[in-house]
Amino acid sequence: MGKYISIHTAISYLPDHLITGEIAQAAIDEGHISILKELPAEFLTTDDTIKVIENSSGGKFDLSAVVPEVLTTKVCEKAIECDVENIKHVPAAKVNRHMLKQLLILTSKNIGLLSFIPANIWDSFAVYKGLFSIFGTTISTSYGRSNRSYSHPLPDDQKHELANQLLGLTPPNIKTKDFYMGFFNIERLSAKDATLLIPNEFKDYDYWKLLAKYGFDLIPEDRYSYEIFLIAIDKESKGNYKLFSDEVWKQIYSCIDDRMADAIIDHSPYHFKKLPPNCRTIPRLLKAIERIDNRKSYDFIMDDRDIHLLTDKVCKAFVKKDRGLPKIPNHIWNDDFAAFCLEYNQSFEWFKQMPKELQTEEIVEKAIAHSDRDISYARPELISLEISQRIFRNYLDHSDILQKYVPQRYIDDFINLTGLPQQFFGGEVSLSGLKSNKGDYTFCKVGHCYLGFYKTARYSGSPAFLIMTRRSPHSIKPQQVFDKKIGTYHSTWLEKMIADNDSLFTKPYVDKKLKQLQINPYYELEYIEFYKGIKIYSNTLFMERINYTAEIKGRVIQEETKEELRKTIDSNLS
């Protein structure tokens, strides 16, 4: 298929004598604006010209070349859309707001064309649109060998010069006080821009009040007043960064009343403690607490001068913020208040200051679960064994930090029960865990014996030891059997050390027919039961059942519990 060529392009290459009426009509129907220059005049009626311009889909044209009969309003609007320079050739009676808006899209570029707009077309919104355009203007600058360009805002002095040119073209009847006050609401215009553009004749008290809302920092000191401060303090006001500076605050302080105090708290709750004493009230403090950031401490809004304001309601408001509590007065504390703290404050900052007689096991457990360090504030009799074991283990290498708060009764009971040193407290694991993990100061119970693993140092490759204790019928607590350095690790290293160092240990005998069910040569084999035609045995050490084994279809299976082994048998027989 050949390349498509538009009709208006084809006509541009045709001699006039070859253009027929049919070709001309097709070109007119195509509607490209360039056809007004390409077609001979005899083929263009006034209606055809209007049709082409009104339906144009692209291209520029010079409105001055169009006969006056063709200049309809729609044609003129289309001409401006194609090229704003055509405003010069639009009859004054045909100019409308649509054309003005087209010029104002790029006001800074088209500022010289705005003089062609009659006074009756202008209104305040058109001027605002022009100012919006001017103060959003950017310019491009090229740099580097690659001639790359970047955009940056037009310098302020150029913006103000263009804005004054626009205002110079604005009809006088539009430039009223309300018109100029509207500058503060124009997006892109800063309060400073507005002050530079508003004539001094309109800078009356209403102007200063409006400036207080949009740019208090621009107001000179001799214009300060109660009403100006009140407007600037409003939380919706802008540009008031120096409002609470030391110099300005001195003047604000001198005229603060209840109305202004409320406005200050709405704007900045952190200024509660700067209010005069008669304005620092409980309702206002509650409002300030509600508005402060949860991450801020109480001392951002109050200090020791206001301790008398700490009522039950105020203290609960602080508790609900969940951060930075003041010192709760003793008379506030009771069971209900403690329960409130537990429900609403998960930072547990209150725990360290609550009276100890109000502590409960639940409160102590949750407080220490949140922070181990809270064990130092807990009543010893409320600290559970589980918490004590966890804290002791967590700080095994730093025993001087929190281990001292673990109730000694738990440690004494442990030593009497196991015969092991106190470092093993809380370190109980299974026999398999002891052998495989080799955790420092971990132990397990096997029958009437306790086996403990430990190292004498923390560096890699430091010597490891196995300690064993045994309870006898005649001893109050288990006695040490041995405490030996571990040589090499292999599958039966622990059991071999027992056999080598425990004089009471005898290596068991197992019938050859059952050898395959003995998982360790140092374990005895005990018959347990007959289940679904399968004999179940247990491997035992010091009469402690270590695991359970059985032979199914010539294959030996083992599990840690009898129930698990039964399930395995069921699945193999199904």
Image: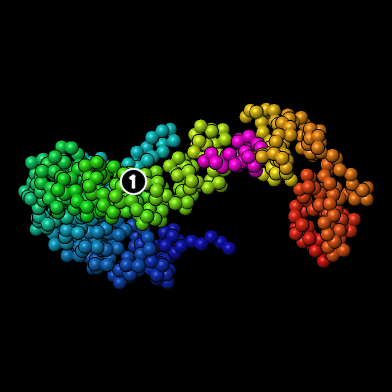
Type of the residue with mark 1: Leu
Q: Which residue in the rendered view is the most extreme toward the right? A: 512
- Residue 418 vs residue 261, the one in the foreground: 418
Image vertical order of residue 131 relative to residue 55, above or below: above
Q: Is 415 part of what is drawn in magenta?
A: yes
Q: Is 324 part of what is drawn in magenta?
A: no
Image vertical order of residue 408 relative to residue 37, above or below: above
- Residue 250 vs residue 111, the one in the foreground: 250
**Quarter assignment of residue 249:** top left
Tell whether 104 sits left or right of 572.
left
As helix, strand or loop, the secondary structure at mark 1 comes to loop
Q: Which residues are magenta?
A: 407-428
x 32%, y 67%: residue: 54
Q: Position of residue 31 (x, y in %)?
A: 38, 66
The quadrant of the picture occupied by the C terminus is bottom right
The secondary structure that most of the magenta stretch takes on is: helix
Location of mark 1 (residue): 325
- Is residue 267 something one can see in this rendering? no
